[in-house]
Image (spheres, helix red, strand yellow):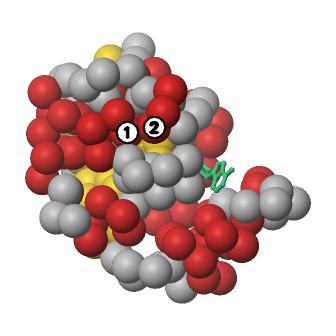
């Protein structure tokens, strides 16, 4: 089925001018960028987005990092977009990421891992609505 997923190009990647190279990987895989904006998150906003991780030991590190530099938030659309995006991203820990994936090529560590992608249809809907109104999704 045609799906939509929420993608974030994280501070470690925007800082190194990797937005275009990462977008090229998404587009080459057949994912269409139907919404995109560059924003500066506050630590509070990062905490609200990652609320499911609130009890994790890395929560403070994660939210401080996500607010440290601008991020690019985007909606990707395509056939099986959620799984396809996860394939293009590679494993969360770059040490485990397959060759050619975004994280294998660009990520610096499990925390500074260049991209986020929704993990299921329900979370994709919630995460897309966190950043975008329906009028901003131009498929
Ligand atoms: P993401 O897909 O954005 O969802 C939660 C994030 O938490 C994850 O990617 C990682 O960047 C981050 N994360 C997971 N494990 C750790 C860890 N051990 N230390 C720091 N950050 C982590």
> Total of numbered circles in the picture?
2
Q: Residue at (21%, 45%) from the top-left corner?
A: 22
Where 31 sits versus 72, above or below?
above
**Which sits in the foreground, 63 or 12?**
12
Residue 31 at x, y percent in the picture: 24, 30
Q: Residue at (72%, 73%) from the top-left corner?
A: 60
**Which sits in the foreground, 12 or 31?**
12
The answer for how far apart the CA atoms under marks 1 and 2 are is: 5 Å
In contact (CB < 8 Å): disc 1 and disc 2? yes
Q: Residues within 10 Å of mark 2 (few under 14, many from 20)?
A: many
- Residue 10, image quadrant: bottom left
Where 46 sits versus 4, above or below?
below
The disc label shown at residue 1, or none: none
Q: Which residue is mark 1?
A: 103
Examine the rendering and report whether any part of residue 51 can be seen.
no
Where 9 sits versus 70, above or below?
above
Q: Is residue 66 left or right of residue 63?
A: left
- Residue 16, image quadrant: bottom left
Where 62 sits versus 105, above or below?
below
Q: Is residue 2 left or right of residue 109?
A: left
Local SS, label 1: helix
**Which sits in the foreground, 89 or 118?**
89
Q: Which residue is mark 2?
A: 94
**Upstream in sequence: badge 1 or badge 2:** 2
Q: Residues within 10 Å of mark 1 (few under 14, many from 20)?
A: many
Examine the rendering and report whether any part of residue 29 can be seen.
yes
């Amino acid at each position: 089925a045609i799906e939509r997923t929420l993608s974030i190009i994280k501070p470690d990647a925007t800082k190194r001018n990797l937005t275009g190279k990462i977008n090229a990987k998404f587009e080459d895989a057949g994912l269409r960028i139907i919404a995109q904006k560059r924003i500066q998150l506050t630590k509070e906003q990062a905490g609200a987005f990652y609320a499911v991780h609130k009890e994790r030991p890395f929560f403070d590190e994660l939210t401080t990092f996500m607010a440290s530099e601008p991020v690019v938030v985007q909606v990707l659309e395509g056939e099986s977009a959620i799984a396809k995006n996860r394939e293009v991203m590679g494993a969360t820990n770059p040490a485990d990421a397959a060759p050619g994936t975004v994280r294998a090529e660009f990520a610096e560590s499990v925390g500074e891992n260049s991209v986020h992608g929704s993990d299921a249809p329900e979370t994709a809907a919630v995460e897309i609505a966190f950043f975008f109104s329906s009028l901003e999704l131009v498929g």
